[in-house]
Image (tube, rainbow, N blue to C red):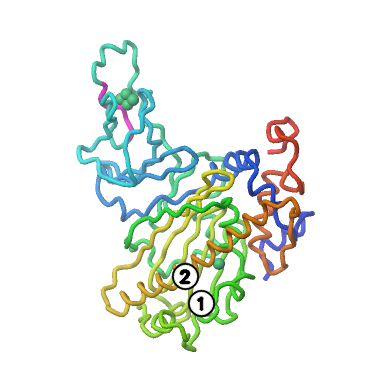
């Protein structure tokens, strides 16, 4: 299939090669990535149903920032930095909550902000002569909602909306009734001692499935596929009719009930979409989860994940959801082992870049995009320190 990715790969002189190992641990490369890749990219926070009432909020912490997403009196959801405009204290704690008083009051000196971010309460106001309250509201953060999921980005560099990014596959997502999803389970945060790109590379890597995921191979045979578009990758695998000999997998194949709103060809299909650069949706007939790999340091990443489902009380559906979790817990354990091995191996002076198979269209596209944003990623060894601050460094 002649995807956009395939077309642009030909223009990249390094197409066919991975990013060099130094970019997976170098502090200066990491800092450049945070500025040029992660700050301008959309990060999923939660689903609209996670903040159903006025005052409900969720937070997302990454890159030293904490963002609050809160539902206002008008029913709209807004995003702000979780920072009081008085002396900079964090306003709210924890991953979620509800501002029952319909305002956010700072625990330090009790400045308060309404749910639209306006500064509405300043104790001892007369002691700040000339204070213009209208200039000290919470700092807004760019927000986007796609099919019920709420995203934020720290910087708007004019990049596409989430809907524009996923547009090539939106028709495939449409039948899953994303707007009707409800969380089941809680957000999990799993620290990994690897560079964030290693998590993403592994997520989009199709070659390792038959080698390193025996469970997925029993379920999908050789049906696993990978496609790449400019800002979204798709991976998919149909669940075979032939029963696995593993008890959880066999039971999943047996119990997974018919889902009335899904077309026939999606009843037994697992699909994965990865949005540039570090957010993914795993879409199963029985449930949907999002997963994002948040960079913490050059060699540390936090995997943030939560499952959602359209309410369905059938016993077979409950069983299928539990079995899915069991199967994928094993897949996760296998991937954790794999990415650690890669991170460890990359620390060797003996390794720089490796070849990418022609079929690895998603990895090729990711590398091409990173090289476009940070041209030093073409160098096999790290340049002398300070490269990212020198005037000739391309942006
Ligand atoms: S820092 Fe928030 S009220 Fe003073
Ligand atoms: Fe994997």
Which quarter holds ligand 2? bottom right
- Circle 1 residue: 215
**Left of 228 or right of it: where is 109?**
left
| Labelled pair 2, 1 in contact (Cβ < 8 Å) | yes
Asked whether residue 187 is drawn in magenta, I would say no
Name the residue: 27% across, 27% down: 120
Asked if 272 appears above or below 105 in the picture, the reply is below
**Left of 10 or right of it: where is 133?**
left
Q: What label sits on residue 330 in the rendered view?
A: 2
| Res. 40 image quadrant | top right
Asked if 113 appears above or below 312 in the picture, the reply is above
Mark 2 C-beta to ligand 2 under 8 Å: no
Name the residue: 42% across, 57% down: 305
Residue range of the region highlighted in magenta in the rendering: 117-122
User: Looking at the rendering, in which quadrant would you find the C terminus?
Assistant: top right
In the displayed image of the protein, which residue is found farthest to the right? 13
Q: Nearer the viewer, residue 204 or 128?
A: 204
Query: What x and y, as percent, mark residue 390?
Result: 72, 31
| Res. 285 image quadrant | bottom left
What kind of element bears circle 1? helix
Q: CA distance from mark 2 to mark 1?
A: 8 Å
């Amino acid at each position: 299939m002649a995807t956009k990715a395939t077309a642009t790969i030909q223009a990249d002189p390094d197409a066919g090669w991975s990013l060099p190992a130094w970019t997976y641990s170098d502090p200066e490369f990491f800092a450049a990535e945070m500025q040029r890749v992660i700050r301008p990219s959309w990060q999923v926070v939660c689903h609209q149903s996670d903040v159903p009432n006025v005052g409900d909020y969720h937070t997302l912490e990454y890159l030293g920032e904490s963002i609050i997403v809160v539902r206002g009196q008008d029913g709209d959801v807004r995003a702000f930095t979780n920072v009081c405009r008085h002396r900079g204290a964090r306003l709210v704690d924890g991953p979620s909550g509800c501002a029952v008083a319909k305002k956010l009051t700072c625990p330090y000196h009790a400045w308060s902000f309404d749910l639209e971010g306006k500064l509405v309460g300043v104790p001892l106001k007369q002691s700040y002569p000339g204070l213009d309250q209208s200039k000290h509201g919470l700092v807004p953060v760019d927000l986007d909602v796609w099919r019920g999921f709420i995203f934020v980005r720290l910087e708007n560099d004019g990049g596409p909306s989430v809907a524009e990014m996923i547009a090539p596959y939106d028709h495939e997502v449409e039948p899953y009734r994303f707007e009707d999803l409800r969380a089941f389970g809680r957000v999990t945060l799993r620290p990994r001692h690897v560079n964030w790109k290693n998590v993403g590379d592994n997520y989009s890597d199709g070659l390792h499935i038959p080698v390193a995921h025996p469970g997925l191979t029993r379920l999908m045979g050789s049906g696993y596929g990978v496609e790449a578009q400019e800002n979204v990758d798709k991976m998919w695998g149909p669940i075979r009719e032939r029963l696995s000999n593993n008890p959880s997998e066999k039971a999943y194949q047996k119990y997974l009930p018919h889902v009335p709103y899904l077309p026939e060809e999606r009843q037994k299909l697992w699909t994965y979409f990865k949005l540039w650069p570090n957010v993914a949706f795993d879409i199963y007939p029985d449930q949907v989860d999002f997963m994002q790999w948040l960079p913490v340091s050059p060699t540390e990443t936090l995997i943030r994940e939560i499952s959602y489902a359209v309410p369905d009380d059938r016993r077979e559906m409950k069983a299928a959801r539990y079995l899915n979790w069991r199967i994928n817990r094993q897949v996760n354990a296998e991937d954790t082992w794999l990415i650690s091995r890669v991170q460890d191996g990359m620390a060797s002076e003996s390794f720089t870049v490796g070849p990418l198979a022609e079929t690895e269209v998603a990895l090729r596209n990711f590398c091409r995009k990173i090289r476009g944003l940070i041209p030093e990623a073409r160098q096999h060894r790290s340049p002398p320190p300070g490269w990212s601050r020198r005037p000739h460094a391309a942006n």
